[in-house]
Image (cartoon, rainbow, N blue to C red):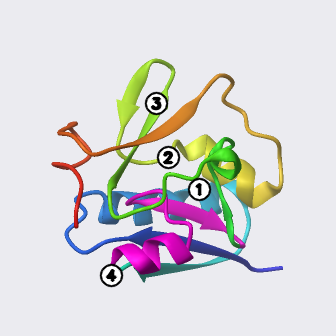
Amino acid sequence: MTRRIEVLVFEGCPNVDATLARASAAAAAAGVPADIATVLVDNEDEAIRRRFLGSPTVRVDGIDVDPGAATRDDFGMQCRIYAVDGRFQGLPPDEWITAALRGDAPRTALTTSLSTGGSVDPCCTGRRG
């Protein structure tokens, strides 16, 4: 069965290419056929409607790869950063994508993601409006 990976982004997100490459590599590592699509989120209303937690957001078959995403409601046109093992990064860990593709439980314990309206490198320069 082919899985669908969506990478939701806003125009100008500096992590699009790396996230697409990571999604492709995760599908290969999982041994799962996947269609990968980039979904451009254009405005705040669309961000709220799509439950967009920031750019980049990765979903497998419509479900965010971030284990904590279901409890969040901070939708909007913002950069998404992920706090993983005490470090910030601008894209979700390979393990989250691979686990989502395989249907496994998250492999990374005590990880969270967050969005920011401030300047946080390497994600991007902040909130978009």
Label 3 secondary element: strand
Q: Nearer the viewer, residue 92 or 113?
A: 113
Q: Amino acid at mark 2?
A: Pro
Q: Amino acid at mark 4?
A: Asp
Instruction: List x then y, in percent, for residue 127.
Output: 24, 54
**Residue ID for mark 2:** 92
Mark 1 or mark 4, earlier in chain:
1
Position of 65 relative to 128 (above/below): above
Position of 109 relative to 9 (above/below): above
Q: Amino acid at mark 3?
A: Ala
Mark 2 or mark 1, earlier in chain:
1
Q: Residue at x 34, y 57 (%)?
A: 18
Q: For the residues marked 3 and 1, what is the alpha-carbon distance in whole angstroms? A: 19 Å
Q: Nearer the viewer, mark 3 or mark 2?
A: 3
**Residue ID for mark 1:** 26
Mark 3 or mark 2, earlier in chain:
3
CB-based contact (under 8 Å), mark 3 and mark 2: no
Label 2 secondary element: loop
Horizontal side, residue 1 vs residue 59: left or right: right
Is residue 47 rendered magenta in the image?
yes
Mark 4 or mark 2, earlier in chain:
4
Mark 4 or mark 3, earlier in chain:
4
Is residue 123 rendered magenta in the image?
no
**Residue ID for mark 3:** 83
Q: Quadrant of residue 31?
A: bottom right
**Residue ID for mark 4:** 42
Which residues make up the magenta segment? 43-61
Q: Nearer the viewer, mark 4 or mark 3?
A: 4
Residue count near mark 1 (Cα–Cα under 10 Å), binned few <14, some 14–19, many ≥20: many
Label 1 secondary element: helix
Q: Nearer the viewer, mark 4 or mark 2?
A: 4
Label 4 secondary element: loop
